[in-house]
Amino acid sequence: QVQLVESGGGLVQPGGSLRLSCVASGSIFVINDMGWYRQVPGKQRDLVASITSGGSTNYADSVKGRFTISRDNAKKTVALQMNSLKPEDTAEYYCNADVRLDVWNPSRAFWGQGTQVTVSS
């Protein structure tokens, strides 16, 4: 199977920055898209940013210009640099990867355990 382990969450003041990291490990044939989602209690999990294996990126409108997603294919990592953080960015952030385990089966989604980001003064 595949494990995704996130790190880098925490408490930050409005206007501050945080960097989230996620590393994938396990029985991986190829990783397609990777991304970050966030969720607040009682609401659905929403896409924050995603990146293809070729480096094409996609961002939620609410984070464009403030967040940057990047990945290292060789190290199987994805990162989210978050700048100019706002209280409304407070959420549990989840790493996501679309992974093929072998050549015979289609890819499937895997999730990390989540890391809390709190933006508050």
Image: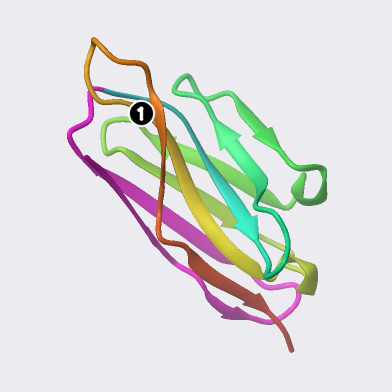
Magenta residues span 1-29
**Could you tell me which quadrant the N terminus lies in?**
top left
Q: Is residue 54 left or right of residue 104?
A: right
**Which of the two residues, 80 or 113, is positioned nearer the viewer here?**
113
For the point 47% across and 62% down, the residue is 114
Q: State whether the magenta stretch is mostly helix, strand or loop.
A: strand
How far from the left and from the top, in percent, is residue 33?
A: 48, 28
Answer above or below: position of 115 versus 47.
below
Image quadrant in which you'd find residue 59:
top right
Instruction: Give the residue at mark 1.
Output: 99
For the point 73% across and 53% down, the residue is 66
For the point 68% across and 67% down, the residue is 40
Q: Looking at this view, name the residue that lies furthest to the right.
A: 61
Residue 5 lies in the magenta-colored region: yes
Q: Is residue 58 left or right of residue 28?
A: right
**Could you tell me which quadrant the C terminus lies in?**
bottom right
Q: Which element is circle 1 on?
A: strand
Q: Is residue 65 left or right of residue 50?
A: right
